[in-house]
Amino acid sequence: MSKCDKNTQMKKPTIRKFTVDDWIVYENSTPPPLKHPKTCTDTINSMCSSGKSVDECIRECDESEKCSFGYHLKYDDNTTKCLPIYTSDYYPTSNPTYSIKNQDCYDIPTDITSHSFISKKRWGSHGILPNEANAVFFDDTVLLGNLLKNTKSFLKNGSGGKISFKEFGGTKLKLLSEYGSGLKTIVEYGDVFSLNMVKNDGGFTSDVMIVVPDTFSKNYYNVVFKPYKNTFLSKEQKFTIIPVPGNTDKQFSYNSNFLLRADTGFLQIRITKNISTLVINTTINPLHNYPPQENKNFDISSMIFNFRPTKYIYTCQSGKCMEHKLIDAKKHGRMATVNGNTAYTRSDCFGSCNWSPGNNYQAVNSVHVSQSVNASANNCDNNWCITLTIILVILIMMAILILR
């Protein structure tokens, strides 16, 4: 039985130095063990190595251009499993730190000791922990919003599968990836997804947003919710996220406005008899022929959408990981803060609330697995500490000269 609750946090990591890279190592922490996409068949050699120590396992990943993340399992009988995961193009935007937790959070035997290791060069160069609380992830639950004529409105599912936009309320939607991979992957411009309807209580439904022909007009397709059964998305269910013309923001986040392109055209809010409905416009491409000469009344804002978050984020306050609504946080690109505190996506704040201020990680020599003198110097990050170190060195040298 899992011994994990919201107070079960990861231990403070160490940094282990190897030939190619420095590695962030979390003791007693693991991704979902031996489960796809992190099983033995997902390693760089499509098999687990046995009989290797933690350092030998990290070195196998360090020496491979295909690996930037892995984990090691040791059993009480001293047998081991080493899993240097194939990540050269497997984690294009998904920091593997998202997938690891304290091993007590998984129902694994108590005779296992786990270590997870992550490339500092690839995943920790801008701060060890992924602080992307304002990033949009696949599987996030959102409201699809639009800003038309200075009035905020949100998609609302109506009777008979018809979709309208109304100023209040909104139907919750889950962002489904084109390929279900089990990775916590950030949504980027150009990504393809489907919109799955979610109940107000968060319960799952099988209804997704689907494009269907309009029997009365060739210029528009209708957009409705219908149940889906296929494993992969069909072209009628796929939408590609496109930057608004003139947009210079390279990173997609909850602050972003965007276009949605289907196989037959661009998503648009069409107002007919004061009713706003969602359609696919098959004749106007806002990327190429805007403003359209043949339709001077066209308003590009009818094709511009945004996501409103419904999820919670978490910050460390007084040593505890506290919950907040993302919508109430201050947003800075993909980052978010609450009362000046960095926000994370995980309800355990990645265990960081128990770490020392400044996140000064203990550096470990990869050969002897012991704290190195250089590591101590690296952890000395203030002027007073550096000055004290210099004085001690001078005193030691003077003592040596006097003794001579």
Image (spheres, rainbow, N blue to C red):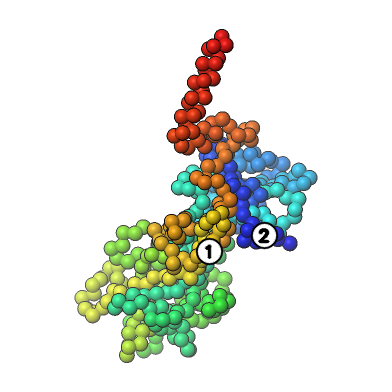
Q: SS of the residue at dot 2?
A: loop
Residue extending farthest top = 404
Q: Is residue 357 visible?
A: yes
Q: Earlier in the sequence, mark 2 or mark 1?
A: 2
Give the CA separation, mark 2 to mark 1.
18 Å
Q: Residue at x 59, y 37 (%)?
A: 364
Q: SS of the residue at dot 1?
A: strand
Q: Residue at x 55, y 65 (%)?
A: 180
How many labels were placed on the picture? Answer: 2
Q: Quadrant of the C terminus?
A: top right
Tag nearer the camera, 2 or 1: 1
Looking at the image, residue 23 lies above or below residue 232: above
Amino acid under disc 1: Glu
What x and y, as percent, mark residue 89? Answer: 51, 52
Between 227 and 336, the one lying in front of the other is: 336
Q: Quadrant of the N terminus?
A: bottom right
How packed mark 1 is, by other alpha carbons closer than 10 Å (few <14, some 14-19, many 20 or more), is some
How packed mark 2 is, by other alpha carbons closer than 10 Å (few <14, some 14-19, many 20 or more), is some
User: Would residue 262 appear left or right of 8 to someone viewing this image?
Assistant: left
User: Would residue 353 appear left or right of 168 to someone viewing this image?
Assistant: right
| Snapshot quadrant of residue 211 | bottom left
Looking at the image, residue 230 lies above or below residue 160: above
Which residue in the structure is indicated by mark 1? 323
Looking at the image, residue 132 lies above or below residue 61: below
What x and y, as percent, mark residue 99? Answer: 58, 56
Between 222 and 371, the one lying in front of the other is: 371
What x and y, as percent, mark residue 33? Answer: 66, 55
Q: Residue at x 39, y 88 (%)?
A: 215
- The disc placed on residue 4 is 2
Amino acid under disc 2: Cys
Determine contact: label 2, label 1, CB under 8 Å: no
